[in-house]
Image: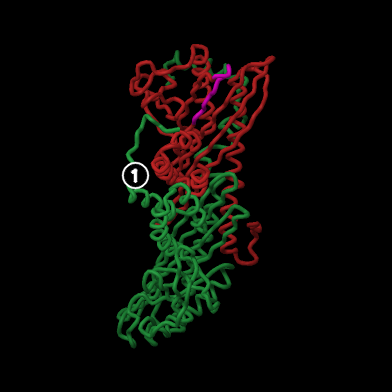
Amino acid sequence: MEAAMDLMRRISPNDSDTALTALLSLLPDHSADLLSQVDQPLQVLCDVDSGKEFLLCDYNRDADSYRSPWSNKYYPPLEDGSVPSDNLRKLEVEANEVFAIYRDQYYEGGISSVYMWEDENGGFIACFLIKKDGSKTADGKRGYLEEGIWDAIHIVEVGPEEEGTANYCLTSTIMLSLTTNGKSHDTFNLSGSLRRQMSMRLSIDEGHLCNMGRMIEEMESKLRNSLDQVYFGKTREMVFTLRPPPEGVQMKLPDC
Amino acid sequence: MADDDYPQPDLTVKEKKEMAKWFLTHAPTGEIQYIAKDIRSVLMDEDVYEMAVSEAFPLYNKAHLISLELPNRTSDILVTTFGELDDTHYLEPRTCQVATVDHVKQACRAVRPARDDELPSSYVEEFRGALDAEVLKYVTETYPKGTCAVYCTNGKDIEGPGADFDLVVVISAVRHSPQNFCNGSWRSIWNIAFKDELQAVEVTGKMQVGAHYFEEGNVQLDAKHECRDSTLLQSPEDSAVSIAHIIHHHESEYFESLESSYSNLPDTTFKDLRRKLPVTRTLFPWHNTLQFSLTRDVSKELGIGK
């Protein structure tokens, strides 16, 4: 399992699908572990009842069907598919509506879905998903990207209420790939995946959604910044270590 | 933790080997040995592992243009398809030596002088040698960890003017820095076609840059570029100077375009995925999401909601 996870850290994020499929068949006894520890690109399905698209993950799956956050129905239809309690469903509906607005303000397009379910400890788990296709043929408003995919998966474990506070543990994963094309036969692709965690104990005066939302917003901004400044920056430094720019040209000195 | 929902038929040896090969050949630059170690413990089958590495390493070594030191320390040798005499023997054209390469260990086992029939004619060698000297000068000045070689890939036996021949220039520069969690490589292959009838030299180049940064994450750059150019067929020395100049010019231009791709990232390219700040330019008002349900109700009434 350790070796499998190391492979996933080395293989290009663009090939993670193929790599995961291969690992699942090589290590059938670890399939549950692999599926829970390796994040996969988000898939999309259409909820015909509401006419809206929703995102698929392990958390809205029951057997081979997926629950839509809009109609609360399973596609393909499933008798007795598990659904959250009425109270939690109410929060889920609100979260989906608010998160769609959040998504639109930051992403100018894309698809989002929020799923919630009770856990055994008296708390609940919420899963916030965003998928944005920023390529110029899709939702890329500025048209710079030949291909550009951003998948965000935020899992928040909310502990039971204690003296007006609750513990929030957020695990966020961003997967992205962007390709810009220059002249013919000229491609520039950056791909990446990052996962981070943060925990906070917060007063629930303003409600769970407000607390979870702020944590996710902060985390997304941090991850975007890390990718942009640190991760892309490091690959750029590497390029300039391989071929240092001519003397006289001011360039930040590479440190690796 | 068996997943009983999806009983999987046992994989055949061939399927396992192909999967292992896929991982090995997709290793980022400088990381195939790590991948091999991982895949060995995933497979738990030494026979399949041995088969996979024996097939994958030669492919990887040639694709990544790896550079190895000759056992007699006279020179480094690039492992390339252009210098491949057979599965394990590779020509080092500058010092006219042939090395026996252990692909899996990524080392040279033995070295011998090249035979005459493995080397180009003295006529072609004049062009090859002159170009090698010019390219070596350029590579030494430009790539701190660069290695280069010039091979004759076509028409190596022609004895004088009146026929076509091809040279290939290979440039490879790598930087492995696992302690800093990053590896990178630059590879370029230039095909130089000497056309006797046209009295011209046609130059086509393929460049590839890769970088992997993996401290608490996995981010990879993969960039490719192709170009073509031409010059007049002149004396070996003059041809060499103008071909090296063409290579220098195109590679510099490509590096400038890489730099501009990077500098466009934060403000333009990346913005099409996710903005730094919302369109409203203030943080999202999580404490006051009621306003959205109000506007939503209004738009529903007006029939403009989604």
Q: Chain of mark 1?
A: B
Q: Residue furthest right?
A: A163
Q: Is residue B218 left or right of residue A203?
A: left
Name the residue: 58% across, 19% down. A121
Percent coordinates x, y for residue B171 in the rendering: 48, 69
**Chain A hue?**
red
Q: Eyeballing the image, is A133 above or below A73?
A: below
Q: Quadrant of residue A166?
A: top right
Percent coordinates x, y for residue A93 in the rendering: 49, 18
Percent coordinates x, y for residue A36 in the rendering: 49, 33
Do we see residue A184 in this rendering?
no
Percent coordinates x, y for residue A92 in the rendering: 50, 19
Quadrant in which the C terminus of chain A appears? bottom right
Name the residue: 65% across, 65% down. A248
Instruction: Depth check: give the residue in front, A201 or B205.
Output: A201
Residue at mark 1 = B11
**Chain B hue?**
green
Q: What are the residue bounds of the magenta stretch? A: A120-129
Question: How many residues crowd mark 1 within 10 Å: few (<14), some (14–19), many (20+)?
Answer: few
What amino acid is labelled 1 in the image? Leu
Q: Residue furthest top?
A: A86
Instruction: Depth check: give the residue in front, B41 or B266.
Output: B41
Instruction: Depth check: give the residue in front, B270 or B109.
Output: B109
